[in-house]
Amino acid sequence: MPHILIVEDENIIRSALRRLLERNQYQVSEAGSVQEAQERFSIPSFDLIVSDLRLPGAPGTELIKLGEGRPVLIMTSYASLRSAVDSMKMGAVDYIAKPFDHDEMLQAVARILRDRQPAAATSEPARASPRGADKPAAAPQGEIGIIGSCAPMQDLYGKIRKVAPTDSNVLIQGESGTGKELVARALHNLSRRAKATMISVNCAAIPETLIESELFGHEKGAFTGASAGRAGLVEAADGGTLFLDEIGELPLEAQARLLRVLQEGEIRRVGSVQSQKVDVRLIAATHRDLKSLAKVGQFREDLYYRLHVIALKLPPLRERGSDVIEIANVFLARQAARLGREGLRFAADAESAIRHYSWPGNVRELENAVERAVILSEGQQLTADLLGIDIELNDLDDDDEAFSTPAAASPTNNHEPTEDLSLEDYFQHFVLEHQDHMTETELARKLGVSRKCLWERRQRLGIPRRKSSVANEG
């Protein structure tokens, strides 16, 4: 059982993180500072160290040296993102921005531990892959790390294996929630850069006024508040892979700088006249049609063709046939183990609902639905109503006519609002009610999710950001 050290000075965060990891079969020790960790433990004896960046006394980065080669995952607030980049240049294996949701942390921990294991040990049970469509233990595409065996996915696996060993730019296309970051991670892990850093950036989650500085760095005095020079995320990915998610949201000015990286292999920090060479493999992803955006001047055409060297298309879940049941069963086993609810299974009506629902939120929506059902269930069988999805009767096959959701069965539901809001209903209601007077960071913190998760749910539910909210982030 992997042994993890948590170093965090806030008791609430430290305790919550310890409980989360222990529920997922990790052994956990904790400390409130670097000094306490030194006094109580032999730091190099841990498999992983998870530490806050800002601690009383010495900063969390001190654990990189004290760990003597043990991986250190740095936790940092969004405002300290540049410091996180500096941490990675000092030797931190990765960083995670606060506030983060449980799945983000579990995915990061599992990935780091898995990457540190010998290749022969990568067939870890479900606990080692706590996130979405990550890694079924016995799947033939195990080294890819994605669940599914339908024909479109088999074709995708073949392309990943061919493309990964090269340094060609890759554009991953697909709807939100289909697993584009998993494809990017597979490309990195199967490349010659696998032992180097992979930096993941959601272009839509960073305010437009900060995106150039975050990506390319800045010099002291480059703008108001730039009290010191900082390296950017592109520079942090030097020698490794840079994954730009939702690149269609990148402002045109930043696109021009990125084009220089691809053409010349160099960057110039904001406010600097000097350029420096970088060796970065770029993987980009989007749910938008970049070619159409380029035609109307919303995306640089020259950048589009630079990115479109290799294009990988991820099919939506509704086009993956029986994969949906395979994925749902993996999620069910994972959630049951996490919550100590062994022996859970889907009832016949739940399986029918899963097969016939269109899953507009794709794999991520399916994962959320299964988690909801496990939490709300009282018996061993998970019924369709626990999934919280809307199935129309005419969407079902003839042999499923006896099945209906409460919404379909109740004739009054079209006239009277229900008091039992689903999780998605609550999310939409909360965001619409509070977005005029709260920033995206505040909304995410109140909802208990990351900024990236908040943005992705906005996309799926069609809730645009208000201009006032965008301005407040700057």
Image (cartoon, rainbow, N blue to C red):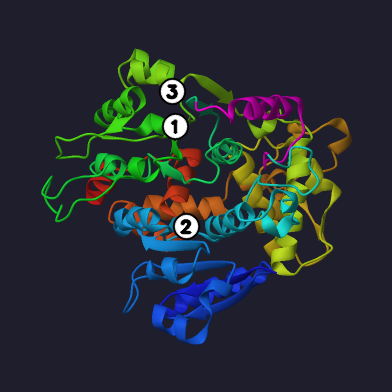
Drawn side of residue 270 relative to residue 433, left or right: left
Q: Which residue in the protein does label 1 denote?
A: 282
| Residue sitting nearer the eye, 209 or 176 | 209
Drawn side of residue 437 relative to residue 464, left or right: left
Q: Position of residue 24 (x, y in %)?
A: 66, 66
Q: Position of residue 310 (x, y in %)?
A: 53, 21
Q: Residue furthest front?
A: 68
Q: Residue 462: say if magenta.
A: no
For image coordinates 71% across by 43% down, the residue present is 408
Q: Residue furthest top?
A: 295
**Image marks 1 and 3: residues in contact by CB distance under 8 Å:** yes
Question: Which disc, if any, is residue 307?
Answer: 3
Q: Which residue in the protein does label 2 denote?
A: 449
90 up-or-down from 189: above or below: below
**In this rendering, the label closer to the viewer, 1 or 2:** 1
Kind of residue at disc 3: Leu
Kind of residue at disc 1: Leu
**In this rendering, the label closer to the viewer, 1 or 3:** 1
Q: CA distance from mark 2 to mark 3?
A: 31 Å
Residue interval drawn in magenta: 144-167
For image coordinates 58% across by 71% down, the residue present is 46
225 up-or-down from 69: above or below: above
Q: CA distance from mark 1 to mark 2?
A: 27 Å
**Secondary element at tag 2:** loop
Q: Position of residue 217 (x, y in %)?
A: 25, 44
N-terminal of the two: label 2 or label 3?
3
